[in-house]
């Protein structure tokens, strides 16, 4: 599928936000982007519209388009949706994974661990995505994969990336996911995925709120007012 100017601009802005090159609240200069990508203002506006629909950018009167601040309520919603989709996608994926595929995800684990030792959080974040999507790409349903990708676009990875202790924890959790996949254990891989996603969300929520909260995914955690 051919990549359009709109898609290229949107992808690059996502990368810059996730890498922290465009901090939360930063203004997006449309004319500067048009000049950088050697294009008219139209594909720039289209790209910004895509990112606004994803919740990555926000537009306000007299303030223009800016990188959205991380809203805990939105992050919680994205997390809940990820918990519904990702364990299932992982279960679908492991039945179709060859020994070569499993070796590939193990290589990602090793490279993430090396990036952690080198204190390179940007490389770790990129490899983390590659690790997870090595599974999601093999879930057997492009629509399911795309829905998960859309949720990942809305998740504040730039903030999670600065929580260094989570990288060491994630390394152990990734290895458990791979072990479950190698064993062909559907329930174990789903539970490992659920726990991994929950731990990341709880660390992020604590960072945003200043308080250690409970996992909102279990039905027992729902408070009806």
Image (tube, helix red, strand yellow):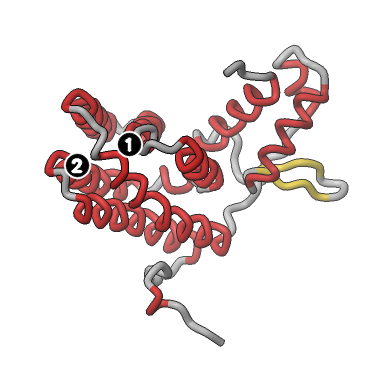
Residue 99 place in picture, x, y as percent? 16, 27
159 to the left or right of 90:
right
Q: Secondary structure at mark 1?
A: helix
Q: 158 or 8: which is nearer to us?
A: 8
Q: Quadrant of the N terminus?
A: top right
Where's residue 106, x and y in %? Answer: 20, 31
Which quadrant of the structure image shows residue 188? bottom left
Residue 38 on image: x %, y %:
75, 12
* Up-down relation of residue 16 to residue 32 (above or below): below
Assess whether mark 1 and mark 2 are in contact (beta carbons under 8 angstroms): yes
Front in this rendered view, residue 35 or 78: 78
Residue at the (82%, 23%) spot, across then down: 41
Residue drawn at point x = 55 percent, y = 46 percent: 154
Which mark is first along the chain, 1 or 2?
A: 1
- Give the residue pinned by disc 1: 135
Q: Horizontal placement of 222 versus 193: left or right?
A: right
- From the viewer's perspective, tell me whether residue 149 is left or right of residue 55: left
Where residue 194 appears, as percent x and y from the top left, is: 31, 56
The residue labelled by disc 2 is 181
């Amino acid at each position: 599928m051919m990549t359009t100017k709109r898609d290229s601009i949107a992808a690059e802005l996502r990368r810059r936000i996730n890498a922290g090159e465009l901090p939360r609240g930063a203004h997006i200069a449309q004319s500067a982007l048009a000049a950088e990508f050697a294009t008219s203002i139209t594909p720039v506006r289209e790209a910004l519209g895509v990112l606004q629909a994803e919740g990555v950018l926000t537009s306000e009167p007299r303030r223009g388009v800016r990188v959205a601040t991380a809203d805990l309520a939105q992050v919680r919603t994205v997390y809940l949706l990820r918990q519904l989709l990702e364990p299932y996608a992982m279960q679908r994926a492991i039945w179709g994974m060859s020994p070569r595929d499993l070796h590939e995800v193990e290589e990602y684990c090793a490279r993430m661990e090396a990036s952690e030792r080198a204190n390179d959080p940007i490389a770790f974040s990129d490899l983390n995505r590659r690790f997870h999507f090595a599974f999601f790409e093999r879930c057997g349903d492009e629509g399911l994969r795309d829905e998960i990708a859309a949720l990942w676009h809305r998740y504040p990875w730039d903030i999670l990336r600065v929580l260094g202790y989570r990288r060491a924890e994630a390394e152990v959790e990734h290895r458990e996911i791979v072990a479950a996949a190698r064993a062909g254990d559907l329930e174990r891989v789903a539970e490992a995925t659920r726990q991994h996603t929950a731990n990341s969300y709880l660390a992020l929520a604590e960072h945003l709120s200043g308080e250690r909260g409970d996992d909102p995914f279990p039905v027992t955690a729902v408070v009806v007012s």
